[in-house]
Image (cartoon, rainbow, N blue to C red):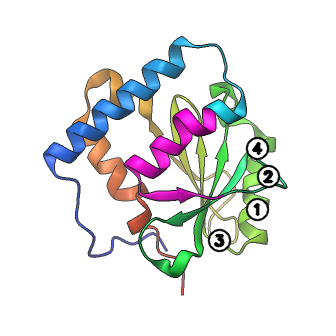
Amino acid sequence: SARGTAGARLTTAQARKALWRVGQLVDTFSAAETPELTPFRERFARPVLEEILGYALLENAAEPRLRPLKAAEGNGGAPVALAWLLPEAEDLDSAKARRQLEAGLIAQNLDYGLMLTPQALRLVRSPRHAPRGASFDVSLAAIADSGGVDSLAAASRVLAAQHIVPDA
């Protein structure tokens, strides 16, 4: 389950640095045309997931949009979640993308998935444990626009790799 471990919360300085980075990423991708998957993955998704949330983004040759995530530190290298990368912000509400992520969670026996667009991040629970459609959304664009240090720190507390603990 997603339980807070004894991991530390972001300090104010860490949250400010992360907010600056999120703002930089959101601004870069909101001003651009819809990016191709590879530039989106390498210049947006990887920094958000790795630098800010502490995941390692793994490869998936079978479906490049669906990526296993492992905790950068700990868990023996086993994936703790999946990420579905959506370069087009409008695709966040796509039933097809949601079903594909949920199918991946079931197939890999994982509890959590993240859907990531240039504007938002959505935490999705495996349908084995929660009603279909239940999710937790974080608007990265709104956090960046408002200078929401506290909002980013709270989102990190929920979404960071160190806090995603597989069910026993």
Magenta residue span: 40-58
> Compared with residue 72, is residue 136 higher up or lower down, i.e. above or below?
above
Q: Which residue is mark 2?
A: 100
Residue 166 position in % (x across, y down): 53, 77
Q: Do tag 1 and tag 3 residues touch (Cβ < 8 Å)?
A: yes
Disc 2 to disc 1, C-alpha distance: 6 Å
Q: Which residue is mark 3?
A: 110
> Compared with residue 59, is residue 51 higher up or lower down, i.e. above or below?
above
Tell me what residue is drawn at x 73 percent, y 72 percent.
108
Residue 113 position in % (x across, y down): 61, 57
Disc 4 to disc 2, C-alpha distance: 5 Å
Say whether residue 120 is left or right of residue 102.
Answer: left
| Amino acid of disc 1 | Gly
Q: Secondary structure at mark 2?
A: helix
- Asked whether 120 or 76 is in front, the reply is 76
Q: Which residue is mark 1?
A: 104
Dot placed on the residue nearer the N-terminal end, 3 or 4: 4
Tell me what residue is drawn at x 75 percent, y 57 percent.
60
> Compared with residue 53, is residue 78 higher up or lower down, i.e. above or below?
below
Dot placed on the residue nearer the N-terminal end, 1 or 4: 4
| Amino acid of disc 4 | Ala
Disc 1 to disc 4, C-alpha distance: 11 Å
Disc 3 to disc 2, C-alpha distance: 13 Å
Disc 3 to disc 4, C-alpha distance: 17 Å
Q: Which residue is mark 4?
A: 97
